[in-house]
């Protein structure tokens, strides 16, 4: 079953209109025909709208609603991944997998040891590309929402954004006590907002860990081995997904 995202206004009672690049994809790549069924989500309400294709136009595809599924595919808590900017194209992989694992939002963070330095113009272009990757991953994994990729923030701005979240964790190589990590992950319950802070390749500086702790973020260990920046994020998101899944 192919899934596509539309804006809420494109769902009009029993009439659903698909526009943009998905028109070409449905017509010329998938070669779908009138009568075939697709799934549509508006990225907001968590519902899946099953509809049948009625008309294949040049600039839009008109569908008729058949039924609505409300099957709770989203995690019952919102997990925010605050990711220190990594080198090369690693951010693309991180966003893709974070979306697959159920992250609600990915926030790129410019930290002291980050090799990548983005000016305002480059950052805007990168975020637009990353948002496209998030949407593609949401389609592939049958998410009901498209997780947002936020604008690049400083660590101070990121900590301010996370200040009211109930669980705030930061994997740190000098932290110890796996039982503490397990206890904190187990405390994540439906309805809570959780923040995960991941450093870049060089990790966080001690001053940044101190700054995070002063903001209520708890350092944890992910085990005895040193993990790459992309692996650390996948690891803790996987644990959180396991904790929250019914």
Image (cartoon, rainbow, N blue to C red):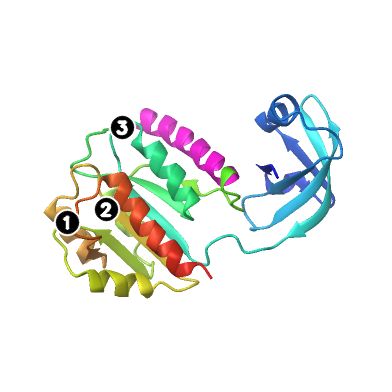
Give the residue number, with chain letter if any, for mark 1.
Answer: 173
Residue 151 visible in the shown view: no
Total numbered labels placed on residues in the image: 3
Tag in front: 2 or 3: 3
Q: In terms of secondary structure, where does tag 2 sit?
A: helix
Residue 118 against residue 221 in the figure, above or below: above
Percent of width and height locating residue 215: 25, 64
Residue 132 visible in the shown view: yes
Q: Quadrant of the N terminus?
A: top right
In the displayed structure image, the side of residue 98 where residue 88 appears, left or right: left
Which region is colored magenta?
Answer: 119-139
Could you tell which of marks 2 and 3 lies nearer the N-terminus?
A: 3
Q: In terms of secondary structure, where does tag 3 sit?
A: loop
Q: In terms of secondary structure, where does tag 1 sit?
A: loop
In the displayed structure image, the side of residue 143 where residue 215 appears, left or right: left
Q: Main secondary structure of the magenta part?
A: helix
Q: Could you tell me which residue is drawn at 41 percent across and 64 percent down?
A: 240
Give the residue number, with chain letter if any, for mark 2.
Answer: 156
Residue 118 is tagged as 3
Label 3 and label 1: CA atoms lie apart by 26 Å
Q: Could you tell me which residue is drawn at 47 percent across and 68 percent down?
A: 244
Residues marked 2 and 3 touching at CB (< 8 Å): no
The answer to if 229 sits in the magenta stretch is no
Percent of width and height locating residue 19: 72, 33
Percent of width and height locating residue 55: 86, 33
Tag in front: 3 or 1: 1
């Amino acid at each position: 079953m192919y899934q596509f995202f539309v804006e809420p206004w494109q769902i009009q009672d029993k009439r659903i209109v698909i526009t943009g690049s998905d028109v070409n994809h449905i017509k010329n790549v998938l070669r779908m025909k009138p009568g075939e069924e697709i799934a549509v989500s508006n990225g907001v309400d968590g519902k899946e709208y099953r509809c049948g294709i009625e008309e294949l136009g040049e600039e839009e595809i008109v569908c008729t609603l058949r039924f609505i599924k409300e099957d709770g595919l989203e995690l019952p808590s919102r997990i925010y991944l605050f990711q220190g900017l990594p080198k090369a194209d690693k951010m693309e992989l991180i966003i893709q997998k974070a979306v697959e694992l159920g992250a609600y939002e990915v926030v790129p963070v410019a930290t002291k040891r980050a090799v990548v330095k983005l000016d305002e113009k480059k950052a805007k272009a990168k975020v637009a590309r990353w948002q496209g990757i998030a949407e593609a991953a949401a389609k592939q994994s049958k998410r009901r929402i498209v997780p947002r990729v936020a604008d690049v923030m400083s660590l101070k701005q990121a900590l301010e954004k996370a200040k009211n979240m109930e669980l705030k964790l930061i994997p740190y190589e000098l932290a110890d006590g796996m039982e503490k990590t397990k206890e904190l992950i187990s405390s994540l319950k439906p309805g809570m907002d959780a923040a995960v802070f991941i450093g870049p390749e060089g990790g966080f500086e001690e001053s940044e860990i101190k700054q995070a702790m002063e903001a209520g973020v708890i350092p944890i260990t992910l085990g005895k081995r040193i993990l790459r920046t992309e692996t650390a994020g996948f690891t803790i998101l996987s644990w959180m997904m396991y904790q929250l899944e019914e």
